[in-house]
Amino acid sequence: MLKARACAVSGTRENAAIPGALVLTPALEFEHALTLADLARLDAKTDATRLSGRLIVVWSGLGGLSDEGLLDAKAEGAASDAPAGDRGIGCTVDAPAGMAGVPLRVSVGAAEEADPPEGGWVEAHAWPIALDEEGAPAKVLRIWTPERAQADPALARCVQALADHAAAVECAVTAIGERLRLPSKYGDVLRHAARLHDAGKAAERWQDAFAAPRQGRPYAKTAARRVDQARLDGYRHEFGSLAEATRDPALSDLPDHLCDLALHLIAAHHGRARPVIETNGAPLMPSTAEELARETTLRLARLQQRWGPWGLAWWEALLRCADAAASAALEKG
């Protein structure tokens, strides 16, 4: 059905390049986007397996929904029961009785002008789809969720100071290390990584984009419902954390191979730096940022030679689990 609708609406070369669907993992994390041209080339045999178990968020302009909200390859436009700003996607709130719907909403708008849908919806993912003349996000596609657990982990039910979050993650990763009976030198690596993993959130750019309260900054968690993508400008706090960590005296005192591991855990704690990490918006000279990113890629190669790809992923998982545990504890109160 997707292929038939894509073929019907793709038309010109410009239309063919329009993002027609977003593919999310079962954990609702972004995997990749499909243009209308990609959808028009879908193959039932090869793509069925690749998309199995995935959640596909479809562009409302693709059509394919009847007025009753049912799949219909002949239907053009969006189902009439959906709210005007969210048609064709995640009509849970407005779906007809008995229709489960999809618990997501999608909107496209200016980077700095995006009010969440009413009813407690929170921004889960956002992708710039158009840039201004200076290369900053001008138009952003956002996915909203009613569940904060599925949103950006920095958008919490309550605020949390950066120092408090770092201490909570350090405590959690220490407990993990003790349960695993890790040698003390590796426990030190994990504690240093936990202490510094979110240091990049102290940047004013990040604090402003996540609407952190002015009093008491810096914060690691805010109670905002969306991110100001124009202010954030693609900045990855992990890269900022990495820059801070390279200047940390205690980390520099570690042997080179252990310092390498700690720096990688910091850079990769949200899945980046394998092998590249974005440098946008970092408070560094461009040449410094490029060199730091280059060294990040080389560091990954060195560590994979030492630990192997799965061994290194295991180390990454320890910090990520501690981070998730600390965030979950905050949500539970």
Image: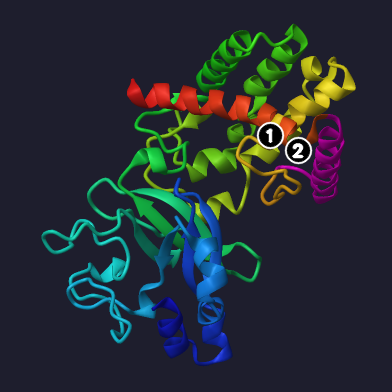
Three-letter residue code for mark 1: Ala
In the displayed structure image, the side of residue 1 where residue 218 appears, left or right: right
Residue tagged by mark 2?
A: 309
The residue lying toward the viewer, choosing from 315 and 168, is 315
The residue singled out by tag 1 in the image is 313
Answer with left or right where residue 170 lies relative to residue 245: left
Measured as percent of width and height from the top left, residue 56 is found at 43, 63
Q: State which quarter of the image contains the N terminus.
A: bottom left
Residue 73 x/y as whole percent: 33, 82
Q: Which residues are magenta?
A: 283-306
SS for dot 1 = helix
Q: Is residue 216 visible?
A: no
Q: Dot 1, crowdedness within 10 Å: few (<14), some or many (≥20)?
A: some
**Residue located 45% across and 45% down the image:** 27
Spatial separation of the CA atoms under disc 2 and disc 1: 6 Å
Do the residues under discs 2 and 1 have CB atoms within 8 angstroms? yes
Q: Is residue 120 left or right of residue 153?
A: left
Q: Is residue 191 visible?
A: yes
Q: Is residue 124 above or below residue 99?
A: above
Is residue 299 part of the magenta span, yes or no? yes
Residue, far front: 45
Q: On the image, which quarter does residue 182 sit in?
A: top right
- In front here: 8 or 256? 8
Image quadrant holding the C terminus, namely top left
What is the three-letter code of the residue carrying label 2? Pro
Residue 69 location in percent, x, y? 22, 71
